[in-house]
Image (cartoon, grey):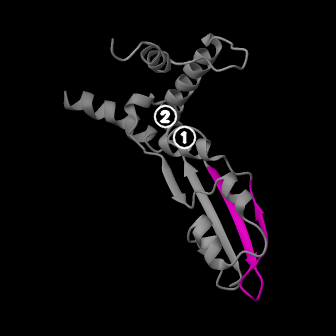
Amino acid sequence: MKRFIFCALIPLTLLSGCSSVGDHIPGWLKPYTPDVHQGNVVTSEMVDALHEGMTKNQVIFLLGTPALRNLFHKEQWNYVYFLKPRFGETSIRKLEITFDEDGRVESFKSDRMPDETNADLAILGERARESTLKRQEELEKEKQEAPVTDGTQQPTETEQAKEETAETPAAQ
């Protein structure tokens, strides 16, 4: 029996050093690894609001404190966002802002940033994305099923009840 266990452990020991073995392990057997989010979440709406001439305080109010301030270029701020999802590819988004000697935005360059909804869904994960898509489909179905009117507003049930009580004589 000891010999059998020893013979079974030799191949496992030899294969444990191979990195390709991890590719063949089923997902349910691998340890849980959460999504990793680091840095500043910057959306396309924030980048659209950023403009030349803004002060450093205005930029901090809009975007938050920068993730990186360059020691050799004190007039340069970098907003970096790193996302390593549990499944899928790692993404890095950068926004670099350069200030002039008066402390105002001189120029900025940005990677393509997601809109606010997609940024929230990236943070919340795949389940949130699925539930949001289902809700959007439900809203589209409701819009399609809604009756089309000619633009005139129909009175609601409460308005009709008020009109009926106003038409009836108060005391007879």
What residue is rendered at 32% in x and 35% in y?
Answer: 9
- x and y, in percent, of residue 128 in the image: 49, 34
Write down the region rendered in magenta.
91-111
- x and y, in percent, of residue 8 in the image: 32, 30
Instruction: Indicate whether 59 appears above or below 10.
Output: below
Amino acid at the residue labelled 2: Ala
Amino acid at the residue labelled 1: Leu
Residue 26 is left or right of residue 46, and the answer is: left
- x and y, in percent, of residue 107 in the image: 80, 72
Residue topped by disc 2: 128
Q: Is residue 110 magenta?
A: yes
What residue is rendered at 56% in x and 51% in y?
Answer: 83
What residue is rendered at 47% in x and 14% in y?
Answer: 167
- Which sits in the foreground, 5 or 133? 133
What residue is rendered at 74% in x and 57% in y?
Answer: 48
Say if mark 1 contacts mark 2, CB within 8 Å. yes
Q: Quadrant of the C terminus?
A: top left
Q: Quadrant of the N terminus?
A: top left
Q: Main secondary structure of the magenta part?
A: strand
Which numbered circle lies on residue 25? none
Residue 51 is left or right of residue 43, and the answer is: right
Which numbered circle lies on residue 121? 1
Residue pushed farthest left? Answer: 1
Q: Quadrant of residue 67?
A: bottom right
Residue pushed farthest bottom? Answer: 101
One can see residue 21 in this view: no
Disc 1 secondary structure class:
helix
